[in-house]
Amino acid sequence: MKSTTRILTSDTSENRRLFLTGVTALAGAAAIGGVRPAGAQGVGYQTLAKPVATRDPSKVEVLEFFWFGCPHCFQFEPTINAWKDDKPDYVDFVREAPPFNPSWENHSRTFYAAEALGITDGMFEPMFDEIHVKRKGMRSAGEVSKFIAGLDLGVDAETFEKAMTSFSVETGMRRGMSLARDAQVSGVPSILINGKYLTSASLAGGNDGMIRVINQMAQLEHDAS
């Protein structure tokens, strides 16, 4: 099985409409992980025709696009976490959780609210486990907020639920959608290295292949800087 969750094309917001304007042709009839962005193709990755800006130009950025509800993202977690714990100092690892589909929205809000409140590290793996191990949908804001409050991270349910609709969360969601559109992401998990090279399990031949591409292209970018 190809370890990629395909982006669906339903939209109920202006953010999704703007995103889909750029990627409908990519996502419309593609098989899972089967559509690749324009640009030169390397071994296990695709080079973007137009690079995407990174957060910190002094670092080589490795950006993961993910969704909490994605089983392939959950399966990729141990692999990417092991890499993250041993990554070079010159690499900046970041994540984005753009809401490609209405059913993803509260999961996206959960991620960006946790970022805004500074509790991402404490809730990230428990959120994945709640969905994929305990088989809880975690679809409603109330359900998510009650769960977060129970993690003893210093944030109560009311505070977290309010954060889910905050300006910073709306900004994060717009940023995630814009980056995914510019990178022409067609499924998750996908990894963008330094705004230039996009890889996924289908491109790289599996999760270990993605790590190989990350290391190879990050080293290349570092050596060129």
Image (cartoon, grey):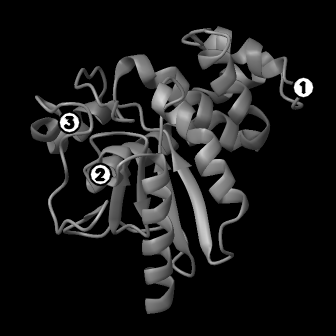
Q: Amino acid at mark 3?
A: Leu
Closer to the eye: label 1 or 2: 2
Q: Which mark is residue 84?
A: none
Q: Residue 121's spot in the image, x, y percent?
A: 75, 43
Q: Is residue 210 above or below residue 127?
A: below
Q: Locate residue 182 relative to residue 148 in the image: left or right.
A: left
Q: Which residue is mark 1?
A: 152
Marks 1/2: CA distance? 39 Å
Name which residue lies at 27% across and 55% down.
182
Residue at the extreme bottom? 224
Q: Which residue is mark 3?
A: 20
Secondary element at tag 2:
helix
Q: Which mark is residue 203?
A: 2
Name which residue lies at 68% across and 53% down.
82
Taking depth in this image into account, of 174 and 43 the one nearest to the observer is: 43
Q: Is residue 225 visible?
A: no
